[in-house]
Amino acid sequence: MSLLETRRLTRHFGETRAVDGVDFAVRAGEVLALIGSNGAGKTSLVNLISGLIRPDSGQILFRDQDVTPHSVNQRIRAGIARSFQLVNLFDHLTCLDNVALAIFSREGKTKKLLALAGRDIAVWREAADVLGQFGLDSKARMLAGGISQGERKLLDVAVAYALRPRLLFLDEPTSGVSTREKAPIMDIITAIVRSRGITAVIIEHDMDIVFKYSDRIVVMHQGTILADGTPDEIRDNATVTTTLIGTTGDARA
Ligand SMILES: Nc1ncnc2c1ncn2[C@@H]1O[C@H](COP(=O)(O)OP(=O)(O)O)[C@@H](O)[C@H]1O
Ligand SMILES: [Mg+2]
């Protein structure tokens, strides 16, 4: 059963067909990789689904409900969260504060934040627990701007996870980190989403990572879906290989 479906979803920027009539479906419980060369439309698709930008036409259905007119916050409340290609953190707040803010916003408590934050023990406990799950316990009191790039990427995912989504979009969770750091980051993220039954869509350009961690792969190219299959099917798909290599010079997504 599809948890999420887009129908003929379209968004153009001038002459650029960033997302062009896309029918994209995510099944409940899967870890799906969304790949494609630079400019293929992956981030735009996630921006449309999370409500950051509006489609020119087409529909987004989440749990069989048409959420196309809904705001970002309505979609978050419905269970759609996302992390960002360029992390979206409050650099001058601590790591713990960044996660706590997400919990407060989930609970609709942001207005009370300044007055009550210090007293709302349950929120701080939960924030500490979330940091612990992401292996960031020792960073709780450090400023988000002062930790390593790999830790920042994890923290950005932790903030999205703290919103308790059913469906979590991760836009290049390992971009900008060393090859050595990629697998540990993906190990942590995929262990958490799989153990919590969270459906995840991961945009990733490292093909070794994609093949290792995903159940299914959707390939975008010039705003459309070029291929959709298991890691084995995609590995053997000549069109995909030719297109990815042909457009970027390597297998980058
Ligand atoms: N806000 C925008 N204004 C103009 N063009 C945009 C905007 N956002 C994305 N695009 C263009 O849409 C295309 C798809 O971009 P994007 O979705 O970021 O691709 P990807 O994430 O696959 O690299 C690119 O050609 C990009 O330049
Ligand atoms: Mg992108």
Image (cartoon, grey):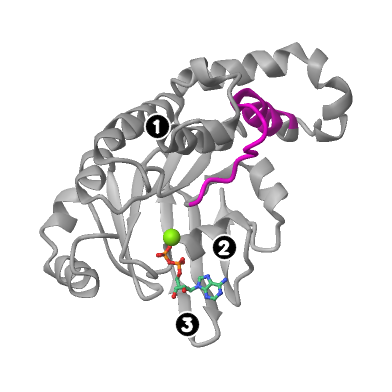
Tell me the distance, in whole angstroms, between the alpha carbons under discs 1 and 3: 33 Å
Residue 5: which numbered mark, if any?
none
Nearer to us: label 2 or label 3: 3
Nearer to us: label 1 or label 2: 1
Q: Would residue 72 be found to the left or right of residue 50 on screen?
A: right
> Helix, strand or loop at disc 2?
helix
Residue 189: which numbered mark, if any?
1
Q: Vertical placement of 94 versus 77: above or below?
A: above
Q: Would residue 215 be found to the left or right of residue 7 on screen?
A: left
User: Mark 3: is the Cβ under 8 angstroms from ligand 1?
Assistant: yes
Q: Which amino acid does label 3 sit on?
A: Thr
Q: Vertical placement of 164 versus 129: above or below?
A: below
Residue drawn 17% across the image and 68% down it: 245
Q: Position of residue 71 (x, y in %)?
A: 72, 56
What residue does disc 3 label?
16
Please tell me whether residue 224 belongs to the stretch shown in magenta: no
Please tell me whether residue 92 belongs to the stretch shown in magenta: yes
Q: What residue type is labelled 1?
A: Ile
> Helix, strand or loop at disc 1?
helix
Pointers 1 and 2 in contact (C-beta within 8 Å): no
What residue does disc 2 label?
48
Q: Position of residue 49 (x, y in %)?
A: 56, 58
Residue 234 in which image quadrant: bottom left
Q: Residues within 10 Å of mark 3 (few under 14, many from 20)?
A: few
> Helix, strand or loop at disc 3?
strand
Tell me the distance, in whole angstroms, between the alpha carbons under discs 1 and 2: 23 Å
Q: Position of residue 99 (x, y in %)?
A: 62, 29
What's the magenta region?
A: 86-104
Residue 42 in which image quadrant: bottom left
- Foreground pick, 151 / 225: 151
Of the image marks 2 and 3, the number of the one nearer the N terminus: 3
Q: Would residue 145 be found to the left or right of residue 244 on screen?
A: right
